[in-house]
Amino acid sequence: MIEIKGLNPQGLAKYIHSEEYGQSPVIPISRHRALSQIRNPRAEAEDVLLLLAYEGPTLVGYLGVLPDRMNGNLKCGWMSCLWIAPEHRGKQIAQKLLQHCFEAWGQKVLATEFTAPAKKLYDKTGLFRDLQVKRGLRLYLRSDLYALLTPRSPWFEKIGFLLKGFDALANAVLDVRFLIWKPSLGDLKLEYVREVDEETALFIERTRSANGFQKGAAELNWMLQNPWVLAAPEKDDFGKRYHFSSTDFSFDFYGIKIKNQQNQLLGFLVFSKRNRFLKLPFCYVGNNWDAVLRVINFHLHRWQVNTFTVFHPGLVERLLQQKSLLFFKREVRRHYLISRVFDPEIYHENFEIQDGDGDCGFT
C-alpha cells in the first residue's frame, strides 16, 4: 500500500531536522535546498513543497514543487525532482505522486527540464499541453568529453582516464585562442553585486515583460542568496544520500550591473557558473544589446568556460549572427509544459519565460 504525504513549509522545516531524515538511507531533498524552498518569497504557508511516497515505513519516491506566479497573480507550482526507488518502479508510484501534486495545487502545475521517461508519463496522463518550446544556443569553447559522456553510460566512466587525457591535450591547444581573442568592454563599467538594490529593481520593472513570471528584486535576491548547489570538493553524507545535485566542485551566481561612463544603468545580468559551464538565468536590458554581448564575450574570455548556454530570444539571434572561429555553436531546445486547466489566453506568443524560470536557474 502506497501512502503519499505532503509537506508545507512548516512541515518541511520539521522534517529536515527529524530523526527520520537523519537516518534515512535516501533523502528527498538536501537541507540547504529545503531551506531555500522555505524562504521562497512566493511560497505561502499552505503550499505543498514536497510530496513523499511511502510503502510502509520505507521512502520509495518523492516529488518537489516550486511555488511561482504567472502574470503577477496566478498562483502555480513547478514540478521538480521526481524520483522513484528502482526496486519499486512499475507500481504506479509516479502517477500517484503526480495525482496528489495536482490535487494539492488545484491542477495549476508546470514542468520543464524533465527526463524522457518523465515526458512519457506526462504525455500519458493527458493533463498537460505545451506552454512553449524555446530555442536556445550552446557555445562550445573548450573540450570536456569526460563531463559530457560519462553521465550517458557506465562504459564511458570506465575509460574516464582516457577522456580526461584527451580533454587536457585538446585544451592545451584550444586555450591558445584566449591569448589571441581578447574582447574589450570598451567604455562600459561593471558592478558585481550579491543583492538587487533599488536602482536595479526599478530598472527591472521598466524592462521586464508584462506577461510571464515577472521576477523582481525579492525573487532574484532569494535566488542569489539561497542556491540549491553548494561549492564543495566532494559530496558530504547528505549529498551521497540524495539523487540530485546538492554540491559540486564550484558553483556561484554573479549579478552584474552594466553601466556607461555617465553611470547610467544599461542592463542587469545574472550568470550562473558551475565549474566551467556558464548559463544566463536572467537578463534585463532595454535596447542596449551591443553592451550585453560585449559583457558576455568578456566573461567567456575571463572565465575560459567550456560551454555557454542561453535561451533568451534576443541574445540567441545576435549570438547566431556573431562571427567567431573561437567556438562551435549548436542550437538546443527546452520544452515547457503547463496543465490544461489554465486558460490558453493566459499565455500567448508574447508570454516571456526567462532562462532561470522554474528550477532551471538553480542547477
Image (cartoon, helix red, strand yellow):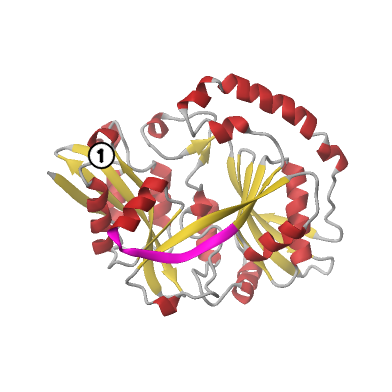
| Residue linked to disc 1 | 89
Q: Please indicate, yes or no, whether residue 362 appears anywhere in the rendered image.
A: yes
- Residue at 22 percent across and 52 percent down: it is 96
Q: Please indicate, yes or no, whether residue 271 appears anywhere in the rendered image.
A: no
| In the image, farthest residue toward the left | 1
Q: In the rendering, at what x and y percent does residue 55 appear?
A: 16, 40
Local secondary structure at mark 1: loop
User: In the picture provided, is 164 more to the left or to the right than 24?
Assistant: right
Total tally of numbered discs in the picture: 1
Quadrant location of residue 148?
top right
User: In the picture provided, is 279 more to the left or to the right than 13?
Assistant: right
**On screen, 290 above or below 361?**
below
Q: In the rendering, at what x and y percent does residue 6 appear?
A: 24, 53
| In the image, farthest residue toward the bottom | 345
Q: Nearer the viewer, residue 103 or 73?
A: 103
Q: In the rendering, at what x and y percent does residue 112 appear?
A: 44, 56
Q: If the image is split into quadrants, where does the N terminus sit?
A: top left
- Residue at 50 percent across and 43 percent down: it is 229
Quadrant location of residue 319?
bottom right
User: In the picture provided, is 46 more to the left or to the right than 157?
Assistant: left
- Is residue 133 highlighted in magenta? yes
- Residue at 83 percent across and 55 percent down: it is 185
Q: In the rendering, at what x and y percent does residue 198 appear?
A: 62, 69
- Is residue 153 highlighted in magenta? no
Q: Which residues are magenta?
A: 125-135
- Residue at 24 percent across and 57 percent down: it is 99
- Dot 1 alpha-carbon crowd within 10 angstroms: few under 14, some 14 to 19, many 20 or more: few
Q: Nearer the viewer, residue 239 or 332?
A: 332
Task: Name the residue type under label 1.
Answer: Arg
Quadrant location of residue 19?
top left
**What main secondary structure does the magenta stretch of the protein show?**
strand
